[in-house]
Image (cartoon, rainbow, N blue to C red):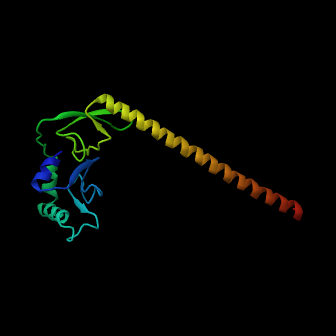
Amino acid sequence: MGIKQLKNEFQIEHIVQRQDLVVHIGSHYIHDLITISPDGSIKKKQLVNDSNGEIWDVFQRLNAAGCVRVKEILMAQDEFGNLITVYHKGRGAKIERTQCEKLGWPNITVEGLLMHDNEFFECRKEAVTKAIHNNIYEFKYIWQSLLSAIRRLGVCIGWVAVGIGKIVRLIILRGY
């Protein structure tokens, strides 16, 4: 995926990353100021305009090149320097192995994944430990949410019972 080539050709200083098949160009705070779809179409957030300086210039350069050229660049293979192996939790419970030139934020992997410091590790064991830790906290959050929902449901059932009791009393008093 030619993300590195895209950055070089269009002099992009912002963070460029891939999420699924979409390429995002953005800042530390807003990751998708500009998005590039798999077909090469380029979209910007409404807040990106000619008063934004550098990101606006990037948008203009991409548009001037056109969708076809941008797609060609993204389809090209990037050339990397010395690569190191890193590990991260992929989808589900799988620990995935990938490569990058430099570990850590705001660098990207050869696939274009942005490497958050708490998600990518040089050691597989660290990635497994972090994944287990995160899954435990995720389970605790889901369990607490379930208990809270059960408590709310109990309150709702109580109010329904009160309502049914009132209806029954009205029926008895009115002689229906």
Tell me where residue 125 appears, x and y as whole percent. Answer: 32, 28
Residue located at (30% from left, 57% from top) = 29
Residue located at (84% from left, 59% from top) = 169
**Vertical side of 169 occupied by 147: above or below:** above
Asked whether residue 21 appears in the rendered view, the answer is: no
Which quarter of the figure is the C terminus placed in?
Answer: bottom right
- The answer to which quarter of the image holds residue 52 is bottom left
- The answer to which quarter of the image holds residue 164 is bottom right
Which quarter of the figure is the N terminus placed in?
Answer: top left
**Vertical side of 60 occupied by 23: above or below:** above
Question: Would you say 22 lies left or right of 157 here?
Answer: left
- Which residue is outermost to the top? 125
**Vertical side of 49 occupied by 139: above or below:** above
Question: Would you say 8 lies left or right of 173 here?
Answer: left
Residue located at (62% from left, 46% from top) = 150
Asked whether residue 99 appears in the rendered view, the answer is: yes
- The answer to which quarter of the image holds residue 65 is bottom left
Tell me where residue 50 appears, x and y as whole percent. Answer: 20, 71
